[in-house]
Amino acid sequence: MSIPSFTHRTPTEIVTETNLFESSGRAYKALSWLDFAKSNRNISALEYAALETRLAIEQLFFEQLVVGVGTRLEAREYKKCSGNANKLNEIIVRLIPRYERLVAFTKAMAPAGVPITEWDNRALIQQSGKVSAYLHWSGGLDVTIQSEKWYEKGIATVEAAANYIWAGLTTGNTGVLAIEKLEPEMRELWELYANNEITIESAVERAETLEPVLKARLTHSTGPAHEAAQAG
């Protein structure tokens, strides 16, 4: 599927066409609004872009951190974060170290050449705060919407955050290994690495040693005898 263009879209097109609500859809709408804002010096479009960018960041956090390395408890916590940026940040900061190790583990175990995006979640937290400044009252009209300096800074701030998300989503994979679906031996390797008991190099060496065993198990589980048993 080709990457859609976010330039030269009308407001009607932005809100009705390719209207998706995951992080990539949010970033796409944000950049579309930014393009319209820059072409028409439209304050509302800048505000819409800021809103979509902040939603893109929050959705991206959920997609990669809570779903990727969280637990059901943390998912419930996440739902309580609506309107509470500080609580959301606390959960994210707690999950970041484990997520970063899972990305490293995923990249090490993935076939060569598979692009995996390594998100800088601490930077995303900072960008979320900067973007949010354009969603709240921040001074008189003369120093905000009537100020060219304020407007240009807003465009640059929101665009930097939206572009970072869009580039990461369109050039690499956000997904990480589903640990609960791994073979027991691979899950053990992950836990050893996650707990800093072995290095990533050691994990790779052990995985290579396990490869024949895992392949044989897969062949056995999908062979004729297994199929006959399943049919019976």
Image (spheres, grey):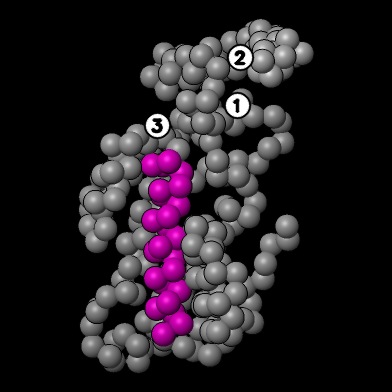
Q: Amino acid at mark 3?
A: Arg
Rendered residue at 49%/46% (across/down): 119
Query: Any mark on residue 207, and which?
Result: 2
Rendered residue at 65%/41% (across/down): 115
The magenta span reads: 44-67
Q: In which quadrant of the rendered image does the C terminus lie?
A: top right
> Which secondary structure, mark 3?
helix
- Dividing the picture into quadrants, the one containing residue 100 is top left
Q: In which quadrant of the rendered image does the N terminus lie?
A: bottom right
Q: Is residue 229 left or right of residue 177?
A: right
Estimate how packed mark 3 is, as few (under 14), some (14 to 19) or many (20 or more) residues with alpha carbons within 10 Å: some
- Dividing the picture into quadrants, the one containing residue 197 is top left
Report how far apart the C-alphas of labels 3 and 1 lie in the structure: 15 Å
Badge 3 is on which residue? 98
Residue 93 % position (x, y): 31, 42
Which residue occupies the foreground of this view, 58 or 138? 58
Which comes before the other along the chain, label 3 or label 2?
3
Was residue 31 drawn as part of the magenta stretch in this picture? no
> Which secondary structure, mark 1?
helix
Residue 144 % position (x, y): 31, 85
Q: Amino acid at mark 1?
A: Ala
Query: Any mark on residue 108, and which?
Result: 1
Query: Any mark on residue 161, and which?
Result: none
Residue 168 % position (x, y): 57, 52
> Which secondary structure, mark 2?
helix
CB of mark 1 within 8 Å of CB of mark 2?
yes
Which comes before the other along the chain, label 1 or label 2?
1
Residue 169 vertical placement versus 181 (above, below): below
Residue 22 % position (x, y): 50, 57
